[in-house]
């Protein structure tokens, strides 16, 4: 074995307990920091999955971001209007299925058309204003968790009878409706229809569960009194964090208002940012404490070895590449063991799962943990050189 | 006359700081082969500093130290290390053996660093050196299993490992009792008389100094005397 490695190995072996304690100390610090990062990342994933995935990540509606430009605005640099009556637009997204087909070519995720409508629900002498959402049961499961939120019936139950409806469980309880109850829907457009309750769902959002009903696209279009109308395209992206960028691109492509979940829930995002700041603060504190411990150990060992290093120097060991600075070597050997030991110390139940599913934060942490000991070792090592 | 092994030319060493301290000043001397030299002087006179300059452990502020006629001030640290490894051997007041290694391994270290011999030959030579100094039975022991005199003998063996022509000793008997002092001093004498080495030893002990061939006296960092001692006391 190389002389320097022999000296280094002999020192490590001779001080087995000290070496073990040093490695254990750093291993614990690194392990906990990785575990913390994995846990926080995992908990953020769950948070997003629970709150964000419950609804589509992007909603494209038939509204325009900017009002229609008037001819005078296009002709003159400045124009002022008084008593302008905007042109009545035919509601809905133009060529919705062609638009969906076009978006499907580049959007990583799933898309589905839907119709948003308002109606008055009448049952047992009670009148309630509800949101009626027309969906396609075949693609709805790809963009929302409605299928998993069903308490009674399934999405396919909408095909069971004409004008079938799925009600939020709180809404159903409020009016006393049960599966197979016949209710009456009266839309704002003046359409009235008799509808059969074929199932109930529980999304966990009180407002949704109390005021929402799902029907087939065609049923909603009848309520809107406009055959073929689609006034919303709902998108679920493969990576929820990319929703904002995709949303902007959809808006540019279609000209319609496209809102990502980040835009819709900016408070939620700031909460996530706050969580990340907290996470890095805690992990940083753990690393700082571990760093001080490591520095102390290595500094003490180096101090103890200063005399030996001087002796080796007097014997003729140089400061060149073949130098004797076994303490430096030992620092590095301990350093290199740290990240490995730290990684193996990840013991949180969700740690490995998160590790496998999203490597970003753990990899950053490992890089940090790998470079940290080197930085810590540098000062004692440079003291060795000057010994 | 054979050329000097070590030569100093107006060597001065000043320690920097708010108040600079002159350790060694304008010392010029030559150390020839097979000499047995004592460097004496009161405490703080600069004896050890001179020895470190002779041994290339320290660089002079001005002047030059020549080893085998080569100037060392222009050498790189690696070249000076090479010279220390092959041409000089050190024995200190304390043994300064590495406690983690057996005494054989301690003696083998300089040889392994020089890497001129095979590992087997290195071990054989280390054991031979230890045996020649009466430590053959202790070769597997670690330094803390030996007495002070034995440890110092191991330090002498380590200094001899690469067969350097010059042994520099800084108070080699300073921490030993009288019996061990006699033993270690006897070994140093033998090195000159039988192995043809040059030994330069810093010592306070005038009795020991009087048994050496030449005495260099240092006072306040300056050369205060350089005299040959009567042959009756010195080794043949």
Image (tube, grey):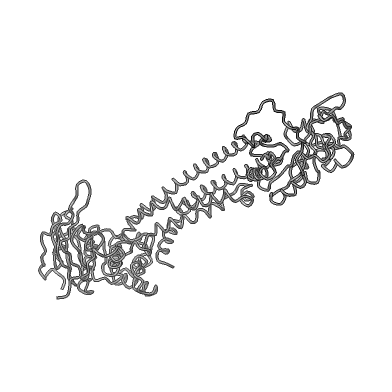
Q: Residue at x 42, y 52 (%)?
A: A377
Residue A143: name its quadrant. top right
Q: Residue at x 60, y 51 (%)?
A: A359
Does residue A130 sit above or below A362 in this rendering? above
In x, y percent, where is residue A351? 61, 48
Does residue A292 sit above or below B2 in this rendering? above
In x, y percent, where is residue A273? 57, 39
Which residue is more in the foreground, B176 or A149?
Answer: A149
Work out whether residue B189 can be spotted: no
In x, y percent, where is residue B67? 22, 68
- Identity of the residue furthest to the front in this view: A75
Quarter placement of the C terminus of chain B: bottom left
- Identity of the residue furthest to the top in this view: A125
In x, y percent, where is residue B208? 16, 63
Which residue is more in the foreground, A118 or A14?
Answer: A118
Position of residue A26 in the picture relative to residue B72 (left or right): right
Which residue is more in the foreground, A146 or A325?
Answer: A146
Which residue is more in the foreground, A266 or A221?
Answer: A221
Work out whether residue A340 can be spotted: yes
Quarter placement of the N terminus of chain B: bottom left
Position of residue B231 in the picture relative to residue B124 (left or right): left
Residue B138: name its quadrant. bottom left
């Amino acid at each position: 074995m190389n002389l320097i490695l022999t000296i280094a190995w002999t020192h490590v072996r001779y001080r087995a307990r000290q070496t073990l304690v040093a490695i254990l100390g750093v291993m614990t610090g690194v392990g906990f920091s990785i575990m913390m990062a994995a846990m926080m990342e995992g908990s953020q994933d769950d948070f997003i999955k629970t709150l964000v995935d419950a609804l589509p990540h992007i909603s494209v509606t038939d509204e325009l971001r900017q009002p229609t430009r008037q001819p005078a605005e296009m002709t003159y640099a400045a124009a002022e209007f008084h008593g302008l009556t905007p042109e009545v637009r035919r509601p809905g997204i133009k060529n919705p299925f062609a638009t969906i087909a076009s978006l499907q070519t580049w959007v990583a995720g799933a898309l589905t058309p839907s119709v948003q409508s308002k109606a008055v629900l009448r049952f047992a002498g009670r009148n309630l204003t509800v949101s009626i959402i027309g969906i396609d049961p075949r693609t709805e499961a790809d963009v929302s968790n409605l299928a998993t939120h069903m308490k009674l019936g399934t999405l396919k139950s909408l095909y069971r009878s004409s004008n079938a409806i799925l009600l939020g469980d709180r809404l159903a309880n409020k009016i006393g409706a049960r599966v197979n109850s016949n209710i009456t829907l009266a839309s704002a457009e003046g359409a009235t229809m008799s509808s059969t309750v074929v199932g109930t769902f529980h999304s966990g959002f009180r407002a949704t569960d109390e005021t929402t009903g799902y029907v087939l696209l065609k049923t909603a279009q009848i309520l809107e009194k406009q055959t073929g109308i689609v006034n919303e395209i709902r998108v679920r992206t493969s990576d929820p964090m990319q929703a904002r960028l995709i949303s902007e691109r959809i808006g540019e492509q279609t000209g319609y208002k496209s809102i990502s979940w980040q835009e819709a829930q900016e408070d939620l995002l700031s909460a996530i940012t706050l969580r990340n700041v907290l996470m890095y603060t805690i992990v940083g504190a753990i690393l700082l404490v571990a760093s001080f411990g490591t520095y102390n150990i290595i500094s003490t060992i180096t101090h103890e070895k200063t005399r030996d290093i001087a002796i080796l120097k007097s014997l003729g060991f140089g400061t060149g590449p073949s130098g004797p600075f076994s303490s430096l070597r030992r620092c590095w050997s301990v350093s290199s063991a740290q990240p490995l030991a730290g990684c193996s110390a990840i013991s949180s139940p969700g740690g490995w799962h998160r590790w496998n599913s999203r490597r970003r934060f753990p990899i950053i942490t490992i890089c940090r943990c790998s470079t940290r000991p080197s930085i810590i070792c540098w000062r004692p090592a440079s003291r060795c050189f000057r010994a | 006359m054979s050329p000097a092994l070590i030569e100093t030319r107006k060597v001065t060493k000043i320690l920097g700081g708010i108040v600079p301290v002159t350790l060694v000043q304008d010392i010029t001397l030559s150390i020839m082969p097979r000499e047995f030299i004592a460097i004496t002087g009161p405490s703080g006179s600069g004896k050890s500093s001179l020895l470190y300059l002779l041994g290339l452990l320290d660089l002079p502020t001005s002047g030059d130290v020549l080893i085998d006629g080569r100037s060392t001030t222009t050498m790189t640290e690696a070249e000076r290390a090479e010279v220390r490894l092959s041409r000089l051997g050190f024995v200190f007041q304390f043994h300064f053996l590495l406690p983690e290694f057996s005494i054989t391994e301690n003696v083998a270290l300089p040889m392994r660093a020089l890497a001129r011999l095979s590992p087997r030959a290195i071990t054989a030579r280390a054991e031979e050196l230890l045996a020649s100094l009466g430590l053959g039975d202790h070769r597997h022991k670690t330094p803390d299993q030996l007495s002070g005199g034995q440890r110092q003998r191991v330090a002498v063996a380590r200094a001899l490992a690469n067969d350097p022509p010059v042994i520099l000793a800084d108070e080699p008997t300073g921490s030993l009792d009288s019996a061990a002092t006699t033993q270690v001093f006897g070994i140093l004498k033998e090195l000159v008389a039988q192995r043809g080495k040059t030994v330069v030893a810093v010592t306070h002990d005038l009795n020991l100094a009087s048994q050496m061939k030449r005495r260099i006296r240092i006072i306040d960092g300056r050369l205060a005397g350089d005299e040959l001692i009567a042959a009756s006391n010195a080794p043949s």
